[in-house]
Image (tube, helix red, strand yellow):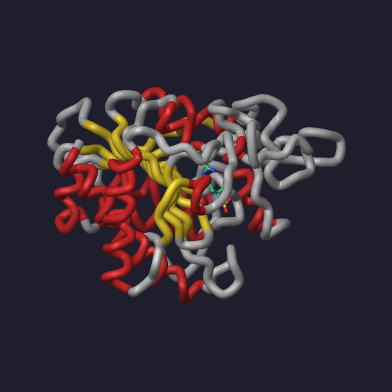
Amino acid sequence: AISFKAFHRLSEINAYLDELAAAYPSRVSVQVAGKSYENRDIKTITISNGDGKSGKSVIFLDAGIHAREWIAHAGALYVIHQLVENFAANSALLKNFDWVILPVVNPDGYEYTHTSTRMWRKTRKPVSSSCYGTDANRNFDYHWGEVGASSSSCADTFKGETAFSEPETQLVRDLLLGLKSRGKFYLTLHSYGNYLLYPYGWTSSLPASWRDIDDVAQAGAAAISAATGTKYTVGSSTNVLYAAAGGSDDYAFAVADFPISITMELPAGGTGFNPTTAQILPYVDETWVGIKAMAQKVVDKY
Ligand code: 0X9
Ligand code: ZN
């Protein structure tokens, strides 16, 4: 088991995934999808209903692209907890869909926020003699570097020396492309600000299918509002937040052909990226209400 009364180190998170795979072998498997720059395991957990059917459609969820956004990692763990340990209540979401969840995209950055610099955002690969790290959410190869991304290696939004310069973004790319055609819903958890964002992040133009994505996101926002009163802002990244190219959401949608692709910015908590430990459970529980509503829409339609 894992508690939602504390934030957890990478070793505890990875141990929880392995514990679930051991306890629920018919419904859960854990993969080492690859290694971070500093050689940490990056694990995915695949959750099914155990009916043995392969090739189902997939909901892919990740978190922790940005190191300091701790409530996002906790949110992904709570989704895992619900789908696996509260399976009976959530089995409709697993009938015709498998879920693949990657709770810590950027483990080097995440550990660094625990051991050294709480507000670290980027990966940890050295770039220049004095600066480290690339913004993984500016490093995907779709209109890479065109807007809202820095060319300075010291900046928090450094786009990287090349698109996909980071092993962590290469890994997400390969997972997404591997799910091409099966992948229906890409959801990436960030914080903060209570937004449900969809393509595009690189232009104020909307994709032709934007209403389909808006439907899903609005269902999430409505469910959260009904449950707790918390308001989420729904719209395209560029139009409701800011233009920033090279994000994983645009890539999943435009290159890996996920028809629904959403970035969810969880609530802040008193001090922005640093909710109190007492806020974790209410926040992730509320987030799950929204994710469930969005997933239900996707499962009904795709
Ligand atoms: O700037 C980002 O990467 C995200 N916000 S955050 O505060 N978590 O850093 C928003 C990303 C929205 N998607 C794209 N711009 N593609
Ligand atoms: Zn973020």
Q: Position of residue 104 (x, y in %)?
A: 50, 46
Q: What residue is shown at x 42% (from left), y 60% (from top)?
A: 233
Q: What residue is shown at x 44% (from left), y 25% (from top)?
A: 255
Q: Name the residue furthest right.
A: 129
Instruction: Say whether residue 53 is visible.
Output: yes
Q: Position of residue 26 (x, y in %)?
A: 20, 39
Q: Is residue 82 above or below residue 248?
A: below
Q: What residue is shown at x 34% (from left), y 74% (from top)?
A: 229
User: Relative to the observer, which residue lies in front, 225 or 178?
Assistant: 225
Q: Is residue 140 above or below residue 81?
A: above
Total number of numbered labels? 0
User: Relative to the observer, which residue lies in front, 125 or 2?
Assistant: 125
The quadrant in which residue 146 appears is top right
Q: Position of residue 119 (x, y in %)?
A: 68, 58
Q: Quadrant of the N terminus?
A: bottom left
The quadrant in which residue 270 appears is bottom right
User: Relative to the observer, which residue lies in front, 99 or 233?
Assistant: 233
Q: Position of residue 281 (x, y in %)?
A: 40, 69
Instruction: Say whether residue 46 is visible.
Output: no
- Is 7 positioned to the left or the right of 88 in the image? right
Q: Quadrant of the C terminus?
A: top left
User: Relative to the observer, which residue lies in front, 154 or 199?
Assistant: 199
- Is 132 positioned to the left or the right of 247 in the image? right
Q: What residue is shown at x 47% (from left), y 31% (from top)?
A: 251
